[in-house]
Every structure is written in C-alpha cells, then in structure tokens.
C-alpha cells in the first residue's frame, strides 16, 4: 500500500478512525509519519479501554463487596491500573491475574495470542500456534455443521498433537 501523503513510498503506519459511524483509514510511510509527529494519535491507552468494559467490576468483586485489589510489592491498586493502563511492577501481573485474564479474553476473544506469528519463531511455538488455529477452525466447522471438514480437521489435530507429544519426549 502506498503512502496517502507523499504517494511514493510504501506505507508502514496504518491508522483507522471511526467518527460518527464513518470509518476513515490513513496509510502513511515512516518518513511522513515522523514529519507529522504527534498529530496522529498512534498510542493505545489500555485505561480508556478498561473504562468501557461492561461488568468489569463484577468480575473483580462478584460478591458485591468492594475491597480494593492492591499489589503487595509496589502498592498499585487495580483501580489505578484501570485509570492509567500500566502496571506498576512484575508482581502486578500475578496480583491482577484473574481480572486481567477476563479483560484480555473480552478484548481479544481468547485468553491466548491468536494473531499473526513472528517470522523468527521457534518450531515448537509455531506448532502450538498452528494447533490453536486448527482447533479454532474445527470449532467453527462444528458450529456451521460442516462435519466432513470437522472430521478432517479433527484428524489433522490428532496428528499434530501426537507430533508435539513425541517432540517433548525426545527432549
């Protein structure tokens, strides 16, 4: 895709903005993006996202009692994380594990990475990624009642799982 500004270079920055129901996409090259500086909102504030998640407070305290969840190491509360979108320390990931998992699953539709995989990835990680993709395709095939496709995918998954088990035993 060519840059919308200079019209010559390959676009590497892709921005999508939805305003009043209208979606506008902007594709710019690196040099034009540097020239524009902070004119474009190119960051993602997790705090803004958390504020729009319905039922998040129920996930934190289903009983209705509002006792703040606080990291023992740095003293950061989950409420603070919700406001600024950044955790205070490495221990926050464990302290806020349950609510973070629920938020991530709601935002990404899965509790694990399902997007693109890097080109330089270990063989075992690639196999796990491919297995998850096959399992997702199997689920969709069953939902759409494409049972022949589902049977083929089931067999392919079984072969891949056997291959992964064999690889773990060799180590």
Image (spheres, rainbow, N blue to C red):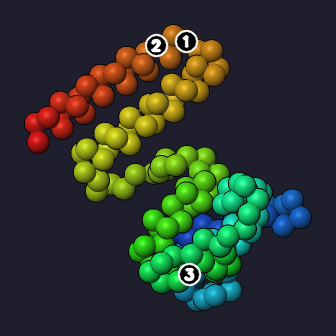
Distance between the alpha carbons at the discs numbered 3 and 2: 49 Å
On screen, residue 70 above or below 133: below
Query: Percent from the top left, x then y, of residue 132?
Result: 43, 37
| Front disc: 3 or 2 | 3
* Left or right position of 86 against 18: left
The residue drawn where x is 44% and y is 31% is: 134
Which circle marks residue 147 in the picture?
1
Which residue is disc 3 drawn over? 76
Q: Which quadrant would residue 47 be assigned to in this image?
A: bottom right
Q: Quadrant of residue 70?
A: bottom right
Q: Does residue 97 show up?
A: yes
Label for residue 151? 2
Question: Callout 3: few (<14), some (14-19), or many (20+) C-alpha neighbours within 10 Å?
Answer: some
**What residue is drawn where x is 51% and y is 29%?**
137
- Which residue appears at 57% of the width and 61% of the height? 100
Residue 36 position by quadrant: bottom right
Label 2 environment density (alpha carbons within 10 Å; few <14, some 14–19, many ≥20): some
Which percent across, then down, holds residue 154? 42, 19
- Work out how far the residue at label 1 is from the one at label 2, CA to CA, in angstroms: 6 Å
Q: Residue 5 location, x and y as percent? A: 65, 77
Disc on the earlier residue, 3 or 1: 3
């Amino acid at each position: 895709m060519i840059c919308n500004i200079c019209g010559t270079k390959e676009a590497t920055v892709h921005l999508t903005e939805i305003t009043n129901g209208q979606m506008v996409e902007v594709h710019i090259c690196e040099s034009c993006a540097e020239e524009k500086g902070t004119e474009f909102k190119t960051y993602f504030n997790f705090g803004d996202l958390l504020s729009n998640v319905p039922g998040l407070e129920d996930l934190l305290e289903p009983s209705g009692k509002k006792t703040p969840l606080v990291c023992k190491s740095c003293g950061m509360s989950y409420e603070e994380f919700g406001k600024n979108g950044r955790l205070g320390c490495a221990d926050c990931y464990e302290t806020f594990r349950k609510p973070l998992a629920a938020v991530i699953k709601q935002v990404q539709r899965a509790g694990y990475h399902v997007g693109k995989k890097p080109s330089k990835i270990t063989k075992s990680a690639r196999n796990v990624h491919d297995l998850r993709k096959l399992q997702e395709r199997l689920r969709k095939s069953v939902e759409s009642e494409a049972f022949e496709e589902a049977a083929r995918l089931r067999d392919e998954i079984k072969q891949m799982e056997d291959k992964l088990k064999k690889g773990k035993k060799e180590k």
